[in-house]
Image (cartoon, helix red, strand yellow):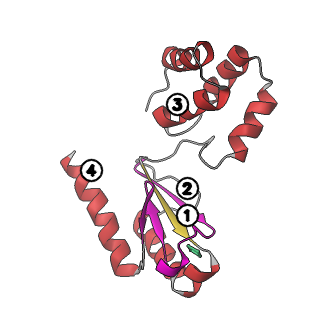
């Protein structure tokens, strides 16, 4: 996705001159681009009169923000203890193999980002995989294959 300075400027101005806050502006940019481009951080610093270092602190503190471009679909595999003992390492391994990426990486086609997380608070349903915010429980290798197939089929249709 191309980064548009004008568009970022517009989003920031809407928040800066409305009731919004720096966080709201960053959330809007994150929602639009799936990450916070450096251009956005510089513009936000200027508009809100907040030092760059402070904006980077906010951006790295909250999990909702990413400083690196993410894929269209974000897969999070829970590696917390309960999910781990129920087989999340095998699920993670399968997804890594299928997508050809490691946790923290985005596929070359920018379709997938793979992440690991520690306990999502749904241990009884583990292993858990979260796809674009949607929880899938009792995950196993076969279900992971199916999950990826479903996403890819939807992409082909789109
Ligand atoms: S360990 Fe995975 S949800 Fe708690």
Q: Secondary structure at mark 3?
A: helix
Distance of mark 3 from mark 2, alpha carbons? 23 Å
The quarter of the image that holds ligand 1 is bottom right
**Direction front: furthest residue:** 19
The residue nearer to you, when weighing 72 against 107, is 72
Distance of mark 3 from mark 1, alpha carbons? 28 Å
Point 54% across, 30% down: residue = 29
When the figure is inspected, residue 8 is found, relative to residue 150, above or below; the finding is: above
Instruction: Please name the residue that numbered disc 4 is placed on.
Output: 155
Q: Residues within 10 Å of mark 1 (few under 14, many from 20)?
A: some
Distance of mark 4 from mark 3, alpha carbons? 24 Å
Residue 131 lies in magenta, yes or no? yes
Instruction: Please name the residue that numbered disc 2 is placed on.
Output: 105
How far from the left and from the top, in percent, is residue 77? 52, 68
How far from the left and from the top, in percent, is residue 127? 49, 78
How far from the left and from the top, in percent, is residue 93? 50, 76
Nearer the N terminus, badge 4 or badge 3?
3
How far from the left and from the top, in percent, is residue 157? 18, 49
Please give the range of residues in magenta: 110-136
In front: mark 4 or mark 3? 3
> On the rendered image, what quadrant is the N terminus found in?
top left
In front: mark 4 or mark 1? 4
Quadrant of the image occupied by residue 153 = bottom left
In this rendering, the count of numbered labels is 4
When the figure is inspected, residue 5 is found, relative to residue 79, above or below; the finding is: above
In front: mark 3 or mark 2? 3
Instruction: Please name the residue that numbered disc 1 is placed on.
Output: 102
């Amino acid at each position: 996705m191309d980064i548009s300075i004008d568009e970022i400027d517009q989003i920031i101005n809407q928040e800066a001159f409305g009731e919004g806050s720096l966080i709201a502006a960053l959330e809007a940019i994150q929602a639009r681009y799936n990450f916070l481009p450096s251009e956005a951080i510089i513009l936000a610093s200027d508009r809100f009169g907040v030092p760059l270092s402070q904006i980077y602190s906010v951006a790295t503190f909250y999990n909702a923000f990413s400083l690196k471009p993410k894929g269209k679909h974000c897969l999070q595999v829970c590696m917390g203890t309960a999910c781990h003992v129920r087989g999340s390492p095998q699920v993670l391994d399968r997804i890594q193999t299928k997508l050809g990426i490691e946790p923290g990486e985005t596929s070359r086609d920018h379709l997938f980002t793979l992440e690991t997380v520690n306990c999502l608070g749904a241990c009884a349903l583990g292993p858990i995989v979260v796809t674009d915010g949607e929880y899938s429980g009792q995950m196993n290798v076969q279900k992971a294959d199916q999950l990826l197939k479903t996403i890819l089929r939807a992409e082909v249709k789109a």
